[in-house]
Image (cartoon, rainbow, N blue to C red):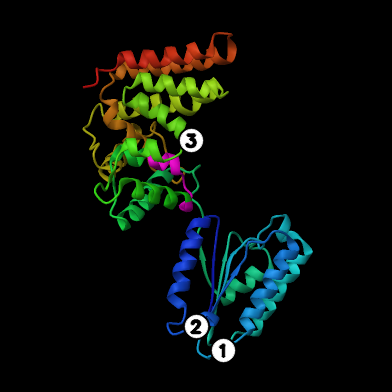
Amino acid sequence: MPTSNIHVIYGTDDGACAEAALKLFNQLKPDDGDDFANDIVDGNADNAEHAHEICSKTIQALQTLPFFGGGKIVWLKRATFMGSDRTSEAERAKVGVEALKDTLEAGLGDDITFILSATGIDKRRAFFKWLKDNATLIEHNKLDTSKDGWEEQVAMMVQKKAKELDLNFTADAMELFVMLAGEDTRQINVEINKLDLYLGKDRRTVELDDIRKMVPLSRAGLVFEVGRALQKRDGARALELIDQQLDRGESAIAILRASLIPTIRNLFMARAAGENMKLPSHNYKAFAGALDNLPEMERAWLPQKKAGGVNAYPLFLAARDAQAFPLTALKKAMESSLDADRSLVTTSLDHRMVLHRLVVELMSSARTRR
C-alpha cells in the first residue's frame, strides 16, 4: 500500500500539475507550523550538476527536523530532470535521483510529508517503479488534440475555471477561445485571468470581440477563424484572413485543406443529416444523441470517433449556420473544393485567386445575413 506521506503529481500538463501540487501543499502543511516547517525546493534544473544539487538539497530538507517540533512538509517543486531528456539521462542527474530514492526508501518520520511535482517521470526507471508501490500518484496529461472530441473537454475545463471567477462565455466566444487557448491548462488559466481583469466588475459575460482583443491569435486560431467566418457568411472576413496568411508565407494548399475543406464538409454533413429530421442544434448532448440514434446506414457516412460513435462536435458547431446554405449548393461547394485542390497541385493558376473563387462561390449561394 502507498504510504500516506509521499505524494507525486506529474504529467505533461504543467499548469494542471502546478495547480494540483499547490492545492495539496496548502492542504497538508501544518496549521501551526513555522517557516522552518515548510521547505519548498525549486526543481527547475539548468543542467545535470544542478539536478544533483537539487536532489541533495531535498534530501537535507527531508532529514532536518523543524526547530520547534511538530509536523514538516517538503515540496520538490516542478522537477525537470526525471524524464528522458538530455539532462535527465546524464549520469550526475541519475546519481542524485538515486540518492533521493534511497532516502525515501529508508523511511520518513511520521511527521514528515514529501510532495514531488514533476513535468515528467520516466516510467521505466527504478525510481518511478518504487514510487508506484510506495507513494500516492496523480497524473495530469494534456489532452490529445489529435483525438476526436478534445474541444468538448477543453470547453468543460474553461467553463469550470470561468465559473470560479463568475464569468460566462457566449457560445461564439467559447468556440474561439477553445481554439486559441488550446489544451494547455496554464495557458487557459492565464487567458481567463486576463479576460477577468479586462472585463472588470461591471461586465461578467465574455463576448466574441473580447476574445479577439485579448487572446493571441495562434495558427490554429487563424485556421478556425477562417472556417468560422465562412460558417457565419462573412466572406469579407474570410478573404481578409486568407490574404493575411498568404502574405505571411502560408501555403495555399495548407489553408485549403486545414480550413476551407473541413468547414465546407462539416456544413454539408450537418445540413444533410438534418434534411430528414429536426436536429436539436441548441443543445449539444441532445444533438449528439440524435445522431447516434440514427439508423446505422444513415450515420455510417458521418465523421466517426476512433472509439466508436459519431464525432458530433464539429457538426454541432456547423448545424445552425448550415441552414443558411441550400444542400445542393453545399454539394457543389464540395465538388469545387476538390477542383480547387487539384488546381493548386497541378496547375499554375494564381493560388490567391483559386481560394478567393471558392470562398465567393460559397458565399454567393448562402441566404443573405440579417
Report whether residue 311 is seen: no
Q: Amino acid at mark 3?
A: Ala
Residue 59 percent location from the top left of the image: 66, 78
Q: Amino acid at mark 2?
A: Asp
Q: Disc 2 marks which residue? A: 34
Looking at the image, tell me whether mark 3 or mark 2 is earlier in sequence order: 2
Which image quarter: residue 125? bottom right
Circle 3: element type:
helix
Which residue does the image show at 72% across and 75% down from the upper left? Answer: 99
Within 10 Å of disc 1 (Cα), the crowding (few <14, some 14-19, many 20+) is few
Residue 345 percent location from the top left of the image: 58, 16
Q: Amino acid at mark 1?
A: Phe
Residue 184 is a magenta residue: yes
Which residue does the image show at 69% across and 79% down from the upper left? Answer: 102
Circle 2: element type:
loop
Q: Disc 1 marks which residue? A: 67
Circle 1: element type:
loop
Which image quarter: residue 51? bottom right
Q: Given the current orientation, which residue lies at the most extreme right position?
A: 91
Q: Which residues are magenta?
A: 177-186
- Residue situated in front as seen by the camera: 338 or 112: 112
Which residue does the image show at 46% across and 31% down from the upper left? Answer: 222
Compared with residue 80, is residue 149 higher up or lower down, i.e. above or below?
A: above
Alpha carbon of mark 3 to alpha carbon of mark 2: how far? 48 Å
Q: Disc 3 marks which residue? A: 220
- Residue situated in front as seen by the camera: 339 or 249: 249
Residue 16 percent location from the top left of the image: 47, 58
Q: How many marks?
A: 3
- Residue situated in front as seen by the camera: 18 or 1: 18
